[in-house]
Image: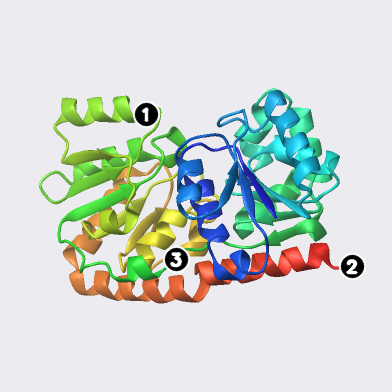
Amino acid sequence: MLHVCSDTNIGGAGRYVLTLLTQPRIAERFTVAAACPEGALAAALRRAGVTVFPYAGADRSLSWSGLRELVGLIRRWRPHVVHTHGALAGRIAGRLGGARVVYTKHGLAAAVEASVQVRSPGAWLRRLAVRRFADRIVAVSGAVRDALIAQGADPAAVRVIPGGVDLGPYEQAPPPVAGVVGALGRLEREKGFDVLLEAMARLRGEARLLLGGDGSQRQALAARVEAEGLPVELVGFVDDVPAFLGRTGVFVVPSRSEGLGLVAVEAMAAGRPVVASRTGGLPEVVVDGETGLLVAPEDPDGLARAIRMLLADPERSARMGAAGRERARALFSAERMAAETAALYEELIAP
C-alpha cells in the first residue's frame, strides 16, 4: 500500500496518514510506504518506522515533476493500492501505474463554495479526477460525502470513514483549567480564528485564549492581538497536542469550513467541552448540548456567549467533557479507522 500525500507539515491529512500507517491492523497486515515531499511529515513517518519515498512538488496537489517521479516509483515498487491524500498527481500516477486507487478527501469539497480543488488551474482535470481517477473515494464525514457527490462522484464509490485518533495520550489529560480557552489549527481564513479574536474581545477579563498553529494569517492575528490588547497568546506550531489541550479548559473550533474537525475529536478525547461552528462535518463530531455547543459560523457574539456559558458552569462543562470522551471512544478511535480502511483494501485486492 503506497500512500501519497503532498503535505510537508503535519496538518490534518498528515496526522491522518501518520496515525493510520502506524496502526497494527494496517502495519501488520500490509506492506506500507509513503510518498511525500521532504518536511516535517516525512521526518515523522521515518521516526515511526514507515518507509518514505520523497518526491518533488511540496504542498501542491498537481506537480508535473512530481507526477513523473510518482509514475516511476509506482512502476518500480508495484503497489497493489495507491492511497492518495489531496494529491491529484498520486491519483493520476496510480492509474498510469496500473494500481487500484483510493482517494481520501479530508476537506469540505463543496462545488457551491468553489473550494481549492475546484478554483485552481486545471479545474477541469480536478473535476474529471473526482469521477475517473479513483476506484474508491473515502470521505471523512457525511458532509464531505454529500459534497463529493454534488461534484459528480459516483455515490457507489464513496465510503465514509471518519478520521481517528490514538486516544491513549489524550485520555491522560489533566483536569480542565478554569478560565482558559484553547484553539488549534492552521492559521488560515477558513479556520475562522479572526472571528474567535472578536469573541475574545467580548470576553476581556473573563477568559484568556491559547491559540496554537501557524499559517499565512499569523502576522495579522498577532498584530491585532497587540493592537487591541486582547487576552490571547499565540503559541506557534504545536507538536504535542495532548499537552497543549492539558493547558485548556474549553476548546473552540470557529471554522468557516471543515471537512470533519479532527481537532474537535482530540479535544473531546481529552475531556474538554467543545464550542464549534455549525458547518461541514463538525455537527457530526460535536453533539449540541451534549458534548459541547454549536454556533453559526461568522458569529463572534454567539461564540462569546457559548464560551461564557461553559466557563460559568463548570459542572455542565465537566458533563459535556465526559460525554465527549465517550463519543470519541465510540466513533473516532484510530483502531476503528484502521479496521474500516483495512476492510476497504481487502475489498480492492480480492481476486
Residue bearing the label numbered 2: 351
Residue 62 location (% of width, % of height): 68, 30
| Nearer mark to the viewer, of 3 and 1 | 3
Residue 179 location (% of width, % of height): 15, 56
| Nearer mark to the viewer, of 1 and 2 | 2
Residue extending farthest to the left is 205
Q: In this view, does 229 lie above or below 27?
A: above
Is 329 on the left-hand or right-hand side of 116? left
Dot 2: element: loop
The residue positioned 30% from the left and 46% from the top of the image is: 301
Is 199 on the left-hand or right-hand side of 284? left
Dot 3: element: loop
Residue 267 location (% of width, % of height): 35, 61
The residue positioned 56% from the left and 32% from the top of the image is: 59
Cα gap from disc 3 to disc 2, whole angstroms: 32 Å
Residue bearing the label numbered 3: 166
Q: In this view, does 190 lie above or below 248?
A: above
The mark that comes first in sequence, 3 or 2, is 3
Q: Which amino acid type is marked by label 1?
A: Gln
